[in-house]
Amino acid sequence: MSQDEQDLIQVGRISGLHGVKGWVKIFSYTEPREGILKYTPWRVKVAGQWRALKLKAGRAQGKGVVAHIEGYDDRDVAATLMNCDIAILREQLPVAKKGEYYWLDLVGLAVINVEGLSLGSVEKVMPTGANDVLVVAGVNGEELLIPFVKDLYVLDVDLASRSITVDWQLDY
């Protein structure tokens, strides 16, 4: 993976066509879904290469998002973008507020409990109805699920030292 690719954050995928004037349906990974429209240019992976493409317009459409990309003004041309990934540069994200974290910043952090025992590292973060959950690849090969509840289970996130301190045990 090139340095440029390491700076990219996938935010969605082009999932279909909408109408005959080049509009496309977007499967957005952002929350809210239409948040993907705030970012331009998009980096779209076309035929294995990332290309910067500008949005002409976009809007929420039912439960999804539709967009019109500059230079893609008819259905046949837009069809060349089908199933292409959409990414943005890391620098396009707003700075996280104090005490807030982007999930991608948590992935790979070491998870250590209050006794100093290494529990593993964050493999991913998943949403649940009540709170987000850290999915930790445990040191013993088992997966740990730790609720991301600050001051109860998650006591400290230190991005500089790439670690998270938790009130959690291996046998929970």
Image (cartoon, grey):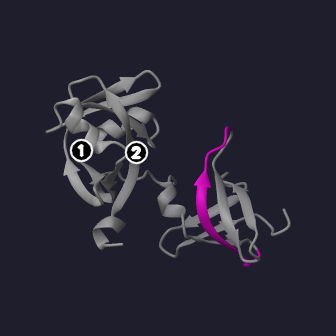
Q: Taken as a whole, is the magenta stretch helix, strand or loop?
A: strand
For residue 140, side relative to residue 132 (left or right)? right
Q: Does the magenta portion include 91? A: no
Q: Amino acid at mark 2?
A: Gly
Q: Mark 1, mark 2: which one is toward the viewer?
A: 2
Q: Is residue 171 above or below residue 86?
A: below
**Start and end of the magenta stretch?**
115-129
Residue 56 visible to an observer of this rendering: no
* Residue topped by disc 2: 12
Which of the 4 image quadrants contains residue 15?
top left
User: x and y percent of residue 112 in the render?
Assistant: 68, 73
Query: What secondary structure is found at the residue carrying circle 2?
Result: strand
Viewer-side residue, 67 vs 125: 67
Q: Amino acid at mark 1?
A: Thr
Q: Is residue 160 above or below residue 151?
A: below
Residue 64 visible to an observer of this rendering: yes
- Single out the residue that lies furthest toward the right: 171
* Residue topped by disc 1: 40
